Structures are given as structure tokens and as C-alpha cells.
Amino acid sequence: MRRVLSIILVLVLASGILVAGCRRPAADEGQLKMALVLNGPISDGGWNANAYAGLKLAEETYGFEIAYSESVQQSDYETAFTDYANQGYDLIIANGFEFTDAVMTVAENFPEVMFGIINGGAIAENVAILGFDNVEAGYLAGAFAGLMTETGYVGFVGGQEVPSITDAQAGMEMGLAATNPEAELISVMAGSWDDVAKGKEIALSMITASNVDVIFPFASAVNTGVIQGAKEKQAYVIGEPNDQLALAPGTIIGSVLQSTPDLILLAAGKVVDGTFEGEVISGNLANGVQNMGTYGDEVPEDVRTRMSEIMEQIKSGEISLR
Amino acid sequence: MTDQAVLQFGLAVLRAATPLAFCALGVLLAERAGVLNIAVEGMMLCGSLAAVLTAVLTQNAWLGVVAAVVVGAVTGLVLGALVVLLPADQVVSGIAFNITAQGLTSFIYKITVIRGVQLIGPATLISLAGPAARGNFLASISPLTYVALVLTCLAWVFLFRTGPGLLWRSLGESARASHASGMNVRRARMAVLVLSGVLCALGGASLTLAWVRSFTDNITMGRGFIALAAVYFGRWNPLLAVLSCLLFGAGEALAFRAQALGSGINPFYYLMLPYVLTLLAVGLMGRAVGPKEAGKPYLGG
């Protein structure tokens, strides 16, 4: 009995492999095809879910035929990219810096296939990096905080001292100087991206020890703790990367939006136009990937107007952040 | 620093040290009875979820504490079944327990998120007089912190000044001798692990009820292991162990405050501070000898 059961079990599992191995039939010639490779599940509600939303957006907007491989293991990175390239996909998006090496290896053999690596570490003729203009994001937060602070002390919380974070920090410094030259920026690195308790502790210490009254946390899940601490001490928080106003009204006064779906759509659009090339595709205000979210009731009309002016000036190049 | 800043610093130290203190006590009592409790991290995680979930659903913070106690006792029984009754290797079982606990709590958390339960705990355990208490230092401390400090003193008196405490320690020094003197080693160690589980879960509860008031995947972030280290630094003495928890808390609170002052030093140095402080303390304390039979399974009758 047990032997029969085990044979049946093996057959069931083996048929699973067969089904998983089946590919969708090839589409009509000429239709653009786009694939996404992720090393986590698309249901994670964050990083991978955002990338998947970008894929769907490209399907809706430009009519791409889409496919994705989720939770791909590191040993299978190159296989996954080679598979899609062999099937004639036009654009293959890799969701994260860690795919850089595998993409570079595969891309060399498929010069006609375009690759985009989100937050990637290298570019080639047919490999682009997709990223956000973090200096600009920081500038927006800094300018906004400068207009809203009453104590003259503004806080920045980073996860770790890495380029994306120091960029945002430098941008915030500039933005703050632009709207409130007397104000001082207090920066703290949490040394973690997901320790909520540290986020809360940093917020409490900034508010009580340094008299900070507006904080811009740029540290993934640590942000949750920062928002909690600020709420308890009645300080303001500028949210990111989504519109977080509803999360803590009265504490969050606005958000700096960084939209991964729009960033992927931007890259897809370049493939449609035939302008995709090996470059850093940077999501910013001008191309609509970055923006300011909804303002809270605390934000006076003149501050909102001033922020719109600043955003216009950045778009027109009147304010240079380089 | 102004008085207010000093006071806030003190509160930050206590906030950070309370979860560690509970867990350190749990680990210490288990090791004194001869059982290594590597599962402290997982027990803490289970307690932290049980506490905040119950507190939110019942809108009563103290019921959250009760839930943590119950769940902690269950985790103690589970670990006991593995390492006392079987008995399996204590280190391996502990690690397996931690991995299981992390998966299980994340799973339950995900279900609550899908069901739309907002995990923001009631504020009643943050301080004795509610979050509005300003200026009054003693009233700004969480009741759970007082519980932890009282338990620390009780544990010391029990272990070193009472007869049952002596028997307890004998379990960790020589289980055979304890058996020869008429003690049921297995039953005693099961009871010890249940108590240890309760204390570790209380550590988790103080994290999610008295500090962050919410839950996320793996919210304990290795704090259980820091408590484990604090036991060694404290030479298996409750008072010294909790003192090293306070030292670690002070290092963490200091790290963020020093960064905020902005001296231009790389933040990595500040983030090292709690660990460096603790290492220094160990260095100054000198050689420590733990319970002789901690970690050794008892195979006798």
C-alpha cells in the first residue's frame, strides 16, 4: 500500500514539473514581448509586487505580451535570462542589483535583446540600469521639511550608508538650504532596513534630544517605527515611497512618491520607440516617475504653492541638482 | 544635555533593556538547571505576536500579557518535549525551534494583515500613567519594566539564598547527583523550561506592548540572542545579566543620540557602540565559568 502511494505521489509531483515546464505558445510575429525575473514572490506586497505591477502596466499601456519567473534561485539566474532571450523576448527586466552579473553574462550573447536591471550595478550596449533620482527625492523632502519646520531642526533617517541613501541625504540637505537656510539637518543611520524598534527609538531621540519636528525616513520597514515614534511625540513625518497619508493622518504631512511601475513603464516605452540603449534610466519628476503625494490638512496653501513652484523649477532645469 | 534629555535617555535605555532582561532571566534560569535555551529568540517572537494580537483583538493590554504567558508556557513544553523527554540535541533543537517560530509567526501575521486587522497595540503599557505623562520619570516607565526588575531581584534571592534555589542550581551542576538525592530530573527540567518559555515570551510581549506596539516579520531581530550573550557576560548571575542588558540598551540609545549630534564620524562606528561596550565589560569581568552540565542531555532514569 505504502509503495503504491509513494509511486502515485512521485507521479503527481513529476506531472507538476511537466506543467511548470510548459510555455505559452509563441505570440504573433511582431508583437513586443517583455519578461520579468524576480528572486522573491510577486505576492510580497512590496518590492516584487511593485515590479509585477509595472509589468502589468506595460501590458495594458503598450500591449506587450508578458511573462515572469518569480522566486528564482541564484543558481538559476542565467538559465532564466537565457530562456527568455532564446524565446525572442524584446525586453527582460531583472528586479534587483543582485542580478547584475548574470544579466551581463547573458546579454553579451543576445545583442538584440534589451535588458533592464532595477538598481543595477553595470551597463552595456543592451543593458540599462533602472533607478530613481534619489537626490531629487531628497531635495523635495528637504524643501518641504524646511517650509514646515517650526523648531528649525529637521531629521533624516537612513538604513545604511550606501549610495542611494547618501544621495537622498545630500539632496535633502540642498532642499532644506533652499527653503530654510537657517534650519539644520540631523541625519541618523539605523544600521538596519527592517528593525522597527530602532526606527522608533531614532524618532524619539531626534525629537526629544535634538528638537527635531519634521522627519524624512528613507529606510524601508524601519519607517514604520519612525512614524510610530513621531506620532507619540506629535512630530511630522514625510512618507515614501508610496502615498502614505492614510497610514497616519496628522503625523504624515505628505509623501515623496517613487513609483516602480512607472519606472518599468518608462523603460518599456523606450523599447516601443526604439530608443532603449545602455544608459541609466533615472525616474524623476520630469518623466513622472517621482512626484509629491497628497498633502495633509496641516499643510498651508502657501506651502503647497511653493512646492508646486519648486517642482516646476526642477522640471524646467531652473533648479539644477547635479 | 538638559535634564529633559537625560531623562529621555534613561527612558530609552529602559525601553531597550526590558525585553532583553526578561529573556536573559529565562535563559539564565534554564541554564542554571542544565538546559541551554537557544530557542529564546523563537519563544520571544511567539510571545510578541501573541501579546499584540490579543491586546488588539480584546483592546486590553494586560490580556495581551496573559496571552504571552500562556503561549510562552506552550513553547516551553514543546522545547521540553524535544530536549528533555526525547532527549534531542539542545543546540540543534533550539535552532530548529527558532526557524519554525519565525515561519509560524510570519504566517499568522500575514493572515491577520489579509483579514485587515490593524496591529497597533493599546498604549496602556507604554508607561504607568499613559503616554501623556511628561516630566515624571518614574511614571513614564512601563509597568513591564518594573515587573522585569522585581523578577530579577527575586531570581537572585531564589537562586542564591533559598533551599529550592540550591536544588535548582544542582540540576545544572550535576544531574546525576540531583537524581541520587531523590529529584525527578526530567520533571524538574520540564518545569524549568515552562518557566523559561514564559519569561522569554514576556520579553517579546514587552517589545510589542511596551515599545513598538506593532508586529512585523521577525520583529525581535536577534534580541533573544543578545539576551543569551548577556547571560554569559553576567556570569549566570541574574543581577549582573540584567546589568549587561542595561549596558547594551545604553549603548544603543547612545549610538542614535551621538549620531544625531553629528560629529562627522562614520555612522558605522556609532552602530558598533553597544557591542563594543558589552565586549569591554566582558573583558573587564574576567573569566567566567558556567553551570557544568548546561547543554548536556540527561540520559539517566
Image: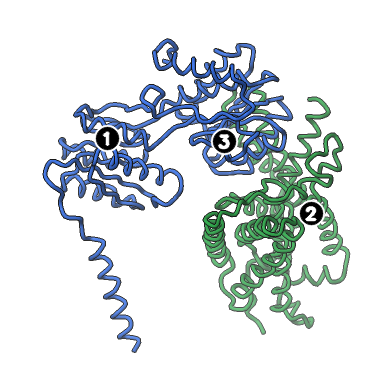
From the viewer's perspective, is B35 left or right of A161? right
Q: Are marks 1 and 2 on the same chain?
A: no
Q: Give the number of the mark in front: 3 or 2.
A: 3
Instruction: Tell me the SS state at disc 2.
Output: helix
Badge 1 amino acid:
Ala
Q: Which residue is mark 1?
A: A268
Q: Are marks 3 and 2 on the same chain?
A: no
Residue at the image position 49 percent from the left and 15 percent from the top: A309
Q: Which residue is mark 3?
A: A245
Residue A7: x and y in percent read: 28, 80
Instruction: Tell me the SS state at disc 1.
Output: helix
Which label number is shown at residue B153?
A: none
Q: In the rendered image, which quarter is residue B164 located in?
A: bottom right
Q: Which residue is mark 2?
A: B148
Q: CA distance from mark 3 to mark 1?
A: 30 Å
Front residue of A74 and A17: A17
Query: What chain does mark 2 sit on?
Result: B
Residue B269: x and y in percent read: 59, 31
